[in-house]
Image (spheres, rainbow, N blue to C red):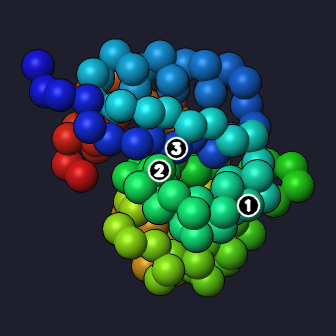
């Protein structure tokens, strides 16, 4: 069994997805810390604060939903792009959505921070492979 060594961040407004994803990520045994945010604004504010004060607490990977209130995934990515150069490490971003719209998939490719577009649901094996690949 690998040692849990990755900080994982879930940004999604769906409580059921958050609960399920947390359990599945925990089951991989690869996450030392899992942070949850229910909108992009809370996540961006956290990243802004941590990049200045505690950069080691920033996540290694972000699983980002598109459709959320307050600040959606696209708006998050616009703000994230302005911040990510200040981070002391590379953070892998996966867009995770129930949308199978090819326009959303194409749009996600326009952001250099986004590694891939994943369609929900994601199973434990997929999470394990994604986190192991960091």
- Cα separation between marks 3 and 1: 14 Å
**Mark 2–mark 3 CB contact (< 8 Å):** no
Percent from the top left, x then y, of residue 107? 57, 73
- Cα separation between marks 2 and 3: 11 Å
Q: Earlier in the sequence, mark 1 or mark 2?
A: 1
Q: In front: 93, or 44?
A: 44
What residue do we see at 26% from left, 29% from top?
A: 4
Vertical placement of 63 versus 70: above or below? above
What residue do we see at 34% from left, 23% from top?
A: 124
What residue do we see at 63% from left, 45% from top?
A: 11
The residue that disc 1 covers is 45
The residue that disc 2 covers is 57
Can you name the residue that lies furthest to the left here?
1
SS at mark 3 in the image: strand
SS at mark 1 in the image: helix
* Crowd class of label 1 (few under 14; some 14 to 19; many from 20; radius 10 Å): few
Can you name the residue that lies furthest to the right here?
70
Q: Is residue 104 visible?
A: no
The residue that disc 3 covers is 9
Q: Is residue 125 left or right of residue 32?
A: left
SS at mark 2 in the image: helix
What residue do we see at 40% from left, 42% from top?
A: 7
* Crowd class of label 2 (few under 14; some 14 to 19; many from 20; radius 10 Å): few
Front tag of 1 and 2: 2
């Amino acid at each position: 069994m690998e040692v849990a060594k990755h900080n994982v961040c879930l940004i999604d407004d769906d409580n059921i997805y958050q609960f399920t994803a947390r359990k599945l990520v925990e089951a991989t045994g690869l996450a030392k810390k899992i942070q949850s945010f229910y909108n992009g604004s809370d996540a961006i504010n956290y990243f802004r604060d941590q990049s200045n004060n505690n950069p080691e607490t920033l996540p290694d990977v972000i699983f980002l939903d598109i459709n959320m209130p307050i600040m959606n995934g696209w708006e998050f990515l616009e703000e994230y792009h302005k911040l990510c150069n200040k981070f002391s490490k590379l953070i892998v971003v996966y867009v995770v959505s129930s949308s199978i719209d090819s326009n959303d998939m194409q749009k996600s490719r326009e952001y250099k921070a986004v590694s891939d577009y994943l369609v929900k649901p994601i199973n434990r094996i997929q999470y394990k492979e994604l986190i192991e690949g960091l």
